[in-house]
Image (cartoon, grey):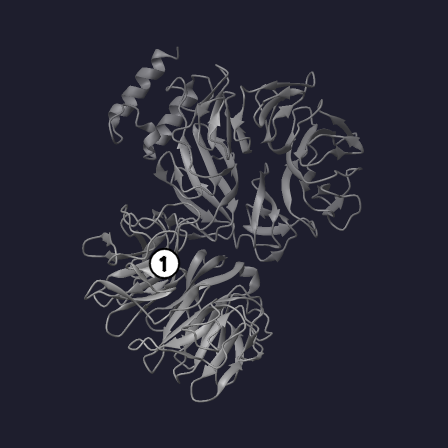
């Protein structure tokens, strides 16, 4: 990560999207407008193994990126490349560094030359051994003496005397004794010198303090032969190496000198100086020799790794890595004001994946996931969407985690089950209810001791709850499934346990419940991943031979049948069902829906009013039809069909409301359009005038169409001409009066 002279921020890594902008492994954030931008076609490919490790700004404003990649801007420019903002193009640095190697560190010298470090042994056709200098004047590379002996150069810094400090995993530099993992080289002569006797293990980061002392951070536990936990200071004036208090508890990955004379340290540690709350990011005060936290309280932070640091204008600090700040909706990168202590996200958008979606009776939609913001709204883990106004709203203070089950009640309240310890700021053990009238949250007693994945409301008002927990409300016999009674705020056993994780529950018309998950027994009887439960009698019964793999989601078909999805190839004795099958309770039999999907992973299912079945997951075909992660089974023909171009990554949640399909997951594109984590899709009926997709051409279709037309919904663009107008109304009414074939 690099903050440019103009205040813009360049980030690099394994990147596919920045905000909602497609950006391949490198992107630009403009704080003045809160916008993200791509840099041409980026570098490398949008696949694992391609990434940017280092970024530098040249005196003329161009940038250089180094890492692991074979192309830049679509051209063959491996490992290191230059980007020009005026031309928007990428170019090579002379003859370059070559392929099948990597650059991990970059440093711009006072004369404008560039120093690169990494795992490479050649640059510009010369033997350079992991560190080299590039002259933009002569467009040539040169070595620093004999370079370093082995390993990788991870860090570079400029010392006050003009020498270059080099850190990494090497055991010697320039053949000089005492240069293990860290050394200095004179850029004019190529002569290497030791910093004491070096450090005991890998150096990942180097910082130079205002007084000239050099600080190294990494994985080492000794420096200069003395104990030093992952971070240590070297005094060039004869002081040698010394620890920074008790150091940190894990790996240091990034460091910055603090203008006050201290140090800011990022990494994958849980404590700094033995102080609680200092995970990932901490500050060391050179005067008091004390560590202090910089991150928000642990409950507001997900993830535990800061990989990159950069100073912005004034007191602004940028931190990038594998973490998210739920309080401000920041994911993988955030900015911190060192004076006020405030954190802020970089731009807006849905800041994390969506795990659950529920369509409400009034047509609005509730979603939950690992986000802190959604389309600019602060909504911790849960939000409500109005499809008419296309706006989002938070539900109070939201959740401290995310929900995987959402159940609306007849009185407008909404029940959430998942993995969270707080709801609306109150204690709630993985399950809670949002009260629509008061806008307040309340808990289900003391909740459960593990994740809740499925919740249904029984006809008598009780709730049946399933998940990974082994206790609910502290009541014995509540292993993976339990019953909650709102009237008494009490939990109870259903009379028997389930052997393993309960993932899905669905209430049948007769009041019985179908239970699906990862279990092999339930209620004391063998049950292969799926079972039937009578909540009145407390009895269990098998569904034939069940499935041969886990059940992930269940849905009731208008016929009363149950649609079963998950990760299995056989159901009820039928083979090659491809993770989706239909169970008929009336005669305890199974039928197939074509040959299902491939690969065999289905995460979610929803049934449309006309009986069509929509599934989402991690598949690319359905019964031989290309269908990327989402597909529709047509009840009328018994055939599978794609839904547009599908999604580019896994779909975890589905819901529908009339002709609208809602999808949630970890995707960034739906139907070849940018749509990160959340998407709406307008489904087409075989009869377009059946606007509400209920297989019944009637007056409600007119109301549904007009509602969409007045709301400006492009689903009402019926005449095929771009934009909405009166001709769309005439086109719809003509089709409606003509009837369906």
Residue at coordinates 52% horizontally, 21% vertically from top-left?
611
On screen, residue 249 above or below 591: below
Residue 508 percent coordinates (x, y):
65, 26
On screen, residue 642 above or below 289: above
Residue 415 percent coordinates (x, y):
60, 43
Q: Disc count in the image?
A: 1
The answer to whether 436 appears left or right of 317 in the picture is right
For residue 359, say whether it is visible.
no
- Dot 1 falls on a residue whose secondary structure is strand
Task: Tell me where residue 677 sits by quadrant.
Answer: top left
Residue 1 percent coordinates (x, y):
37, 62
Q: Residue furthest top?
A: 741
Residue at coordinates 37% horizontally, 33% vertically from top-left?
671
Q: Which residue is mark 1?
A: 11
**Which is nearer the eye, 97 or 343?**
97
**Which is nearer the eye, 40 or 163?**
163
Q: Residue furthest bottom?
A: 238
Task: Tell me where residue 454 sits by quadrant.
Answer: top right
């Amino acid at each position: 990560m690099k903050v440019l002279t103009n205040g813009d921020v360049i980030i690099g890594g394994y990147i596919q999207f920045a905000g909602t902008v497609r950006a391949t492994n490198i992107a630009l954030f403009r704080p003045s407008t809160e916008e993200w931008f791509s840099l041409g076609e980026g570098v490398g490919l949008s696949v694992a193994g391609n990434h940017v490790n280092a970024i530098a700004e040249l005196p003329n404003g161009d940038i250089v990126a180094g890492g692991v990649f074979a192309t830049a801007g679509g051209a063959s420019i491996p490992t290191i490349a230059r980007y020009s903002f005026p031309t928007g193009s990428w170019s090579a640095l002379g003859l370059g560094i070559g392929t099948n190697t990597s650059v991990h560190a970059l440093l711009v010298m006072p004369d404008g030359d560039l120093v690169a470090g990494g795992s490479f042994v050649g640059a510009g056709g010369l033997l350079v051994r992991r560190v080299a200098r590039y002259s933009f004047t002569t467009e040539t590379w040169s070595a620093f003496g004999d370079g370093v002996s082995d390993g990788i150069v991870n860090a570079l810094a400029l010392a006050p005397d003009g020498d270059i400090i080099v850190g990494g995993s090497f055991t010697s530099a320039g053949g000089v004794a005492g240069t293990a993992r860290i050394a200095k080289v004179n850029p004019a002569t190529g002569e290497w010198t030791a910093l004491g006797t070096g450090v005991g293990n890998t150096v990942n980061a180097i910082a130079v303090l205002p007084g000239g002392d050099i600080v190294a951070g990494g994985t080492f536990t000794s420096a200069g032969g003395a104990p030093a936990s992952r971070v240590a200071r070297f005094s060039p004036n004869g002081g040698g190496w010394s620890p920074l208090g008790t150091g940190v508890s894990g790996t240091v990955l990034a460091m910055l000198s603090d203008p006050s004379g201290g140090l800011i340290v990022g990494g994958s540690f849980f404590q700094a100086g033995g102080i609680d709350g200092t995970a990932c990011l901490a500050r060391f005060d050179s005067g008091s020799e004390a560590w202090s936290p910089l991150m928000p309280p642990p409950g507001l932070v997900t993830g535990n790794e800061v990989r990159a640091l950069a100073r912005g204008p004034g007191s602004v600090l940028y931190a990038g890595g594998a973490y998210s700040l739920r309080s401000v909706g920041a994911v993988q990168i955030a900015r911190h004001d060192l004076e006020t202590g405030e954190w802020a996200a970089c731009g807006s958008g849905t800041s994390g994946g969506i795990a659950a979606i529920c369509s409400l009776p009034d047509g609005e939609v509730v979603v939950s996931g690992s986000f802190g913001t959604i389309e600019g709204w602060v909504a911790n883990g849960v939000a409500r969407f109005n499809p008419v106004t296309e706006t989002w709203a938070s539900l109070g203070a939201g959740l401290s985690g995310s929900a995987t089950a959402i159940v609306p009640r007849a009185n407008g309240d909404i029940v959430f089950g998942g993995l969270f310890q707080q709801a609306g700021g109150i204690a709630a053990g993985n399950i809670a209810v949002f009260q629509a009238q008061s806008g307040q949250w309340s808990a289900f007693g003391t909740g459960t001791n593990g994740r809740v994945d499925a919740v249904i409301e029984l006809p008598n008002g009780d709730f049946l709850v399933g998940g990974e927990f082994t206790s609910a409300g502290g009541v014995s016999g509540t292993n993976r499934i339990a019953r909650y009674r709102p009237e008494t705020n009490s939990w109870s056993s259903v009379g028997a346990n389930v052997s393993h994780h309960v993932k899905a529950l669905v209430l049948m018309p007769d009041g019985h419940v179908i239970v699906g998950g990862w279990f092999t027994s339930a209620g004391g009887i063998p049950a292969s991943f799926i079972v039937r439960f009578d909540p009145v009698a407390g009895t269990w019964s098998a569904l034939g031979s069940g499935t041969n793999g886990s059940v992930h989601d269940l849905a009731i078909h208008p016929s009363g049948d149950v649609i079963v999805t998950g990760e299995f190839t056989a159901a009820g004795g039928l083979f090659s069902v491809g993770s989706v099958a239909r169970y008929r309770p009336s005669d305890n039999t199974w039928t197939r829906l074509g040959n299902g999907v491939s690969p065999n992973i289905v995460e979610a299912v929803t049934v449309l009013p006309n009986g069509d079945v929509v599934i989402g997951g991690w598949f690319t075909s359905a019964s031989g039809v290309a269908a990327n992660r989402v597909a529709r089974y047509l009840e009328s023909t018994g055939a599978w069909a794609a839904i547009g171009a599908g999604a580019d990554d896994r779909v975890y949640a589905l819901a529908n409301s009339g002709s609208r399909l809602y999808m949630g997951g970890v995707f960034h594109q739906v139907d070849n359009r940018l749509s990160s984590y959340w998407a709406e899709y307008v489904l087409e009926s075989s009869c377009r005038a059946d606007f509400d997709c209920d297989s019944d051409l009637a007056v409600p279709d007119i109301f549904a169409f007009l509602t969409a037309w007045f709301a400006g919904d492009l689903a009402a663009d019926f005449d095929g001409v771009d934009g909405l107008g009166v001709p769309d109304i005439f086109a719809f009414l003509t089709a409606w009066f003509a009837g369906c074939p």
